[in-house]
Image (cartoon, grey):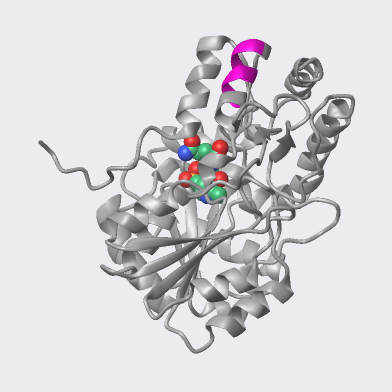
Amino acid sequence: MITSKLPNVGTTIFTQMSQLAVEAGALNLSQGFPDFDGPQALRDAVGRHIASGHNQYAPMTGLPTLRQQVAAKITRCYGVEVNADTEVTITPGATQAIFCAIQAVVQRGDEVIVFDPSYDSYEPAVALAGGRCVHVQLNRDDFAIDWQKLGDALSPRTRMIILNAPHNPSGALISRAELDQLAALIRDRDIYLVSDEVYEHLVFDGVRHVSVLAHPELYQRAFVVSSFGKTYHVTGWKTGYVVAPPTLSSELRKVHQYVSFCGVTPLQYALADFMAEHPEHVDELPAFYQAKRDLFCDLLRPSRFSFTRVAGTYFQLMDYSQIRPDLNDLDMAIWMTREYGVAAIPVSVFYQDPPQGQRLVRLCFAKREETLRQAAEKLCVI
Ligand code: PMP
Ligand code: GLN
């Protein structure tokens, strides 16, 4: 009998709900991915690079041209300089970047603070490093950090804090004042940060994303992670990056080189070309997704769901207390998928200890207008 190293891990909710959506012939607003393609020029570039022989291993740390594009984008967006050679590493997806950052610094017996609701990949990565997650709940109403709870959760064993803003599943942002408060709280402690910023370019209503990259004190102890999958509408390319100071990057690279060695070569060439030719793509993303959020929310106004428009990400939380308060959120998500043809993600799966009576499901609005209209029509009759 094998002794599982991850005894509490099953198949992720994203896989379960996407499978159920297919079985039920439902519109899949559960797992987060666009139902439209990335830019034509980007897809054409991949074909061009495959045809022209860019098919062997990329450098372990990532193609220099792509790392330079990432560094240039960071300077443009956040006004800070990072060294493309020593601070930027390309990985096969943000998930792998997060995994490697955790393996690089978390030792047996260490504690890692995660904020619930928290993304599902953090805890298994901590467990495999021999560490233990300490779950701190975000505020129930606005999903902001509860500083009292965070302070209480810190211990001499705390080795890492995992931040995620814009936040999946709530869409909540983090402010400069909150980063300052965090910096003050951990100033004299030996604590590293993973800042999961994969939705950095999906921030609405004229607000700008506050990156840990632009907070010099926090950056000194941080691994800042992003994903080309979200930014360029190509989640299936599984290509991301991590930016960290040279000493942290060099520890992370020791892990990365034995987890995968390098990212996929023609995808890296294509992304580098596209970023050089279309720097405006990231500037246009907020308006692009805000229009989808607003269309979806406007269409859902007559429904019995209650909601507050999200500040970021491509997820909208929906409170269904007025519809089926008798159902827990997993049952609600299954019922909506089977009976009404719209698949959703229950929010309780992102908690160690879900708040009593919370009735929330998450819907992904990274969809074509036609899909959003069809989904809204179905959701309005529930
Ligand atoms: N972090 C969060 C919060 C996410 O939502 C996702 C997207 N699935 C990831 C990390 C992983 O991104 P990637 O697909 O690039 O591995
Ligand atoms: N990040 C995606 C989501 O939150 C899921 C990615 C995955 O299936 N692992 O829906």
In this figure, what is the number of numbered marks?
0
Does residue 141 appear left or right of residue 65 in this picture? right
Q: Give coordinates of residue 133: x percent, y percent.
A: 41, 60
Residue at point 80%, 39% (across, down): 307
The residue at the far bottom in this view is 188
Front-lying residue, 217 or 380:
380
Does residue 42 appear left or right of residue 60 in this picture? right
Q: Is residue 31 above or below residue 187?
A: above
Quadrant of the drawing holding the C terminus: top right
Q: Give coordinates of residue 368: x percent, y percent.
A: 73, 25
Does residue 211 appear left or right of residue 248 in this picture? right
Quadrant of the drawing holding the N terminus: top left
Q: Is residue 83 visible?
A: no
Q: In this view, does 14 lie above or below 92?
A: above
Residue at point 77%, 51% (across, down): 311
Q: Dominant secondary structure of the magenta stretch? A: helix
Task: Judge whether residue 74 is colored magenta.
Answer: no
Task: Judge whether residue 335 is colored magenta.
Answer: yes
Q: Give coordinates of residue 290: x percent, y percent.
A: 81, 42
Residue at point 67%, 79% (across, down): 180
Q: Quadrant of residue 8?
A: top left
Q: Is residue 266 visible?
A: yes
Q: Is residue 343 above or below residue 158?
A: above
Q: Give coordinates of residue 169: x percent, y percent.
A: 62, 45
Q: In which quarter of the image is residue 42?
A: top right
Q: What stretch is highlighted in magenta?
A: 333-339
